[in-house]
Amino acid sequence: MSAKKTFSTRIDANRLKALKHLAVDEDKSIGTLLEEAIDDLIQKYEQMEGKGEE
């Protein structure tokens, strides 16, 4: 895996609260959950691009 970089953004307070609860429930860091979500999102859009080329 490549080197980690700092990334900062604003997020809705309710989403952040839910994310913090999920991190505790899953015993994972928020960063780990965000990376997982980003990977899923990238995969989703890559699959969509593949379907459009058929």
Image (cartoon, grey):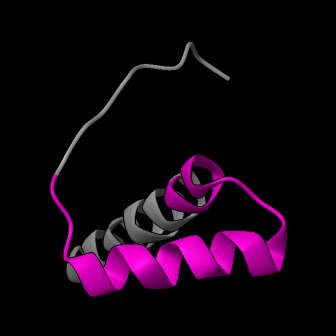
Query: Along the line of sight, which residue is nearer the eye, 25 or 4?
Result: 25
Residue 45 left/right relative to 12 = right
* Location of residue 9 in the rendering, given as x and y in whole percent from the top left corner: 18, 48
Residue 50 left/right relative to 49 = right
- Quadrant of the rendered image containing residue 21: bottom right
Query: Along the line of sight, which residue is nearer the eye, 24 or 6?
Result: 24
Evaluate whether residue 54 shows in this view.
Answer: no
Number of numbered discs overlaid on the protein picture: 0
Residue 29 left/right relative to 6 = right
Does 23 appear above or below 30?
below
Q: Residue furthest top?
A: 3
- Quadrant of the rendered image containing residue 49: bottom left
Decide whether residue 28 is among the magenta residues.
yes
Residue 3 left/right relative to 51 = right
Seen at 52% across and 20% down, the residue is 4
Evaluate whether residue 24 shows in this view.
Answer: yes
Q: Main secondary structure of the magenta part?
A: helix
* Location of residue 3 in the rendering, given as x and y in whole percent from the top left corner: 56, 12
Seen at 84% across and 66% down, the residue is 27
Does 28 appear above or below 18?
above
Does 2 appear above or below 7?
above
Q: On the rendered image, what quadrant is the C terminus found in?
A: bottom left
Seen at 60% across and 62% down, the residue is 33
* Location of residue 28 in the rendering, given as x and y in whole percent from the top left corner: 77, 59
Which stretch did the figure color magenta?
10-34
Q: On the rendered image, what quadrant is the N terminus found in?
A: top right
Query: Along the line of sight, which residue is nearer the eye, 31 or 49?
Result: 31
